[in-house]
């Protein structure tokens, strides 16, 4: 019995040592590897016309800088690749890229980190002459024709407003919607994230103005390839959550 007890104690000690070593290795080590991150246009956070090469130290895009700093301790090399949205999602699912951002995914079609980079607030865009600044005054929307990009989640407030909701189909429904608005073929365009078009550096801001459904939002995430293994995912997720807790991206972006 003593010999058996001694054997059990030795085996238990060996298991404990191995477990402790594994936990130590997983608690903040650098993965000696390259992390490839796809980047899609999402003005004003990501603007391809302004941001030429995200991998040059001289380029100071705040969204890219924030993500790089959050994950730099986990990987030896982080490479950012600019991609059109449709191709980026295909590349992500194939595993050709490890991460993809910024991705608004209201229908939760993609695997992503547990916390969003920031929250997008949906809203309505008007020609400036017909601008309605306060969307809580829903009676002002009654009878207006509002273009809704296909497959876009619509807030309940708008559904109950009495407006005429017109679905916009096609390959680039947001661009189509903006053109319909400018040509007076719709009165209003529902946008899942108006900040993408309504900001200082966008020429459209001279012709349109957007209001927001404050209090109703969804996350804009860093999406993760389904090919990424659980260990890498957990390390990246933990590092990113830690960065957000230290200073949120929204706060960092607002610092000028």
Image (tube, rainbow, N blue to C red):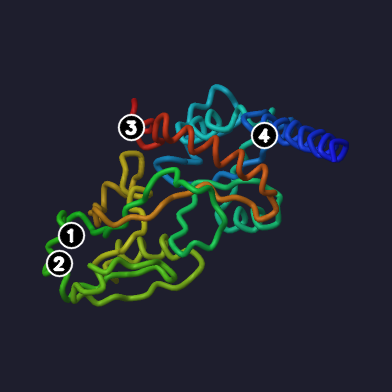
**Quarter the C terminus occupies:** top left
Which residue does the image show at 39% across and 68% down from the upper left?
Answer: 149
**According to the image, label 2 marks what residue?**
138
How far across and how far down the image is residue 97, in percent? 67, 47
**Residue at image x 33%, y 55%?**
217
Where does label 4 land, which residue? 23
Please, is residue 195 above or below residue 238 in the view? Answer: below
* Distance Cα–Cα, label 3 vs label 4: 37 Å
Number of other residues with Cα within 10 Å of mark 1, as a class: few under 14, some 14 to 19, many 20 or more? some
Where 177 sits versus 200, above or below? below
Looking at the image, do the residues carrying marks 1 and 4 touch, with CB atoms under 8 Å apart? no
If you read the primary sequence from the N terminus, does the residue marked by circle 3 or circle 4 appear first? 4
- Alpha-carbon span between mark 1 and mark 4: 51 Å
Residue that numbered label 1 is attached to: 135
In this view, the residue in front, 216 or 114, is 114
Report the mark closest to the observer, 4 or 2: 4
Residue found at x 66% / y 40%: 36
Where disc 2 sits, the SS reads helix
**Mark 4 Cα within 10 Å, few/some/many (few <14, many 20+)?**
few
Comparing 19 with 181, the one in front is 19
In primary-sequence order, the first of circles 1 and 4 is 4
Badge 3: how crowded within 10 Å, few (<14), some, or many (20+)? Answer: few
Q: Picture coordinates of residue 189 (x, y %)?
A: 30, 64
Quarter where residue 187 is shown: bottom left
Say which residue label 3 marks.
254
In the image, residue 137 lies at what x, y percent? 12, 63
The quarter holding residue 151 reads: bottom left
Q: Are the residues at dot 2 and dot 1 in contact (C-beta closer than 8 Å)?
A: yes
Q: Earlier in the sequence, mark 1 or mark 3?
A: 1
| Mark 4 residue element | helix
Decide which of tag 2 and tag 3 comes sooner along the chain. Answer: 2
């Amino acid at each position: 019995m003593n010999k058996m007890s001694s054997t059990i104690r030795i085996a238990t000690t060996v298991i404990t040592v191995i477990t402790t070593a594994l936990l130590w290795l997983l608690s903040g080590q650098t993965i000696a590897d390259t992390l490839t991150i796809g980047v899609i246009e999402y003005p004003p956070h990501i603007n391809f016309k302004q941001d030429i090469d995200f991998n040059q130290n001289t380029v100071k895009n705040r969204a890219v800088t924030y993500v790089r700093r959050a994950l730099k301790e986990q990987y030896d090399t982080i490479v950012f690749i600019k991609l059109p949205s449709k191709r980026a999602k295909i590349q992500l699912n194939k595993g050709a890229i490890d991460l993809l951002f910024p991705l608004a995914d209201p229908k939760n079609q993609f695997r992503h980190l547990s916390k969003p980079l920031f929250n997008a607030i949906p809203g309505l865009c008007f020609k400036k002459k017909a601008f309605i600044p306060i969307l809580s005054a829903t009676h002002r929307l009654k009878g207006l024709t509002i273009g809704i990009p296909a497959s876009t989640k619509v807030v309940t407030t708008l559904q109950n407003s009495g407006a005429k909701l017109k679905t916009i189909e096609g390959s680039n429904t947001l661009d189509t919607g903006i053109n319909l608005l400018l040509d007076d073929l719709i009165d209003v365009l529902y946008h899942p994230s108006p900040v993408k078009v309504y900001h200082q550096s966008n020429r459209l801001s001279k012709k349109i103005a957007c209001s927001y459904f404050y209090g109703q939002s969804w996350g804009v995430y860093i999406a993760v390839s389904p090919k990424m293994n659980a260990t890498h995912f957990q390390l990246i997720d933990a590092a990113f959550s830690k960065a957000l807790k230290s200073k949120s991206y929204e706060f960092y972006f607002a610092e000028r």
